[in-house]
Amino acid sequence: MKKNVIYSLIPLLFAIQSCFAQNKTMDEVNYLDDTFEAGQTWRYHTRNGENNSTLTIVKVEKLKNDTIIHIALSGLKIKHPLVKSGVSESIDHLPFSKEAILNSVIEQIGSQSQLPDFMEGYVQWKEAYESGNGGIFTITVKEAVGYVEQTMNK
């Protein structure tokens, strides 16, 4: 009887351990920064012709002692050969260092609870980052948009 009780407790112990592991992950996901948080919308230093473009913070996390600010951009005019109109108006996910975002933003203009759909790009980036094959932008948002456009048109 005692053996049966012990064996029936083993799955419970694994479940409890997995909950503690999730809490650590949730702490990383819900990292609270003193300046940026998910949902904030900012004006930033844009490229010529994109003055109405805004960036939205979609996620803030701390990984490997780096504060990483994940953003989505709207109001862009990126030449894109695979889009019917030839121009893409948004980017759903780009990861930046906090310093790069601080050097890019001008003022916070709002906050929203409904975030752009960034998860697909985020998951791909996270897998690459954890395997050592992905990084973060340390240049300004304006420069990163130019880089993205240049890369898409090669």
Image: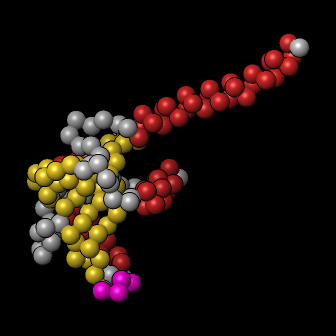
Is the magenta region chiefly helix, strand or loop? loop
Q: Is residue 6 left or right of residue 60?
A: right
Measured as percent of width and height from the top left, residue 27 is found at: 42, 33
Quadrant assignment for the N terminus: top right
* Of the pair 62 and 40, the residue shown nearer to us: 40
Measured as percent of width and height from the top left, residue 121 is found at: 43, 61
**Is residue 6 in view?**
yes
Q: Is residue 141 above or below residue 34?
A: below
Q: Quadrant of residue 139?
A: bottom left
Measured as percent of width and height from the top left, residue 79 is found at: 28, 81
Q: Residue at x 57, y 30 (%)?
A: 19
Q: Residue at x 48, y 37 (%)?
A: 25
Tell which residue pokes out farthest to the right in this image.
1
Q: Is residue 78 above or below residue 46?
A: below
Q: Residue at x 32, y 54 (%)?
A: 115
Q: Quadrant of residue 153?
A: bottom left
- What's drawn in magenta, residue-wise? 81-85
Q: Is residue 120 left or right of residue 101?
A: right
Q: Is residue 130 left or right of residue 154?
A: right
Q: Is residue 88 left or right of residue 15?
A: left
Q: Is residue 52 above or below residue 109?
A: below
Measured as percent of width and height from the top left, residue 36 is found at: 23, 43
Quadrant assignment for the C terminus: bottom left
Q: Residue at x 30, y 86 (%)?
A: 85
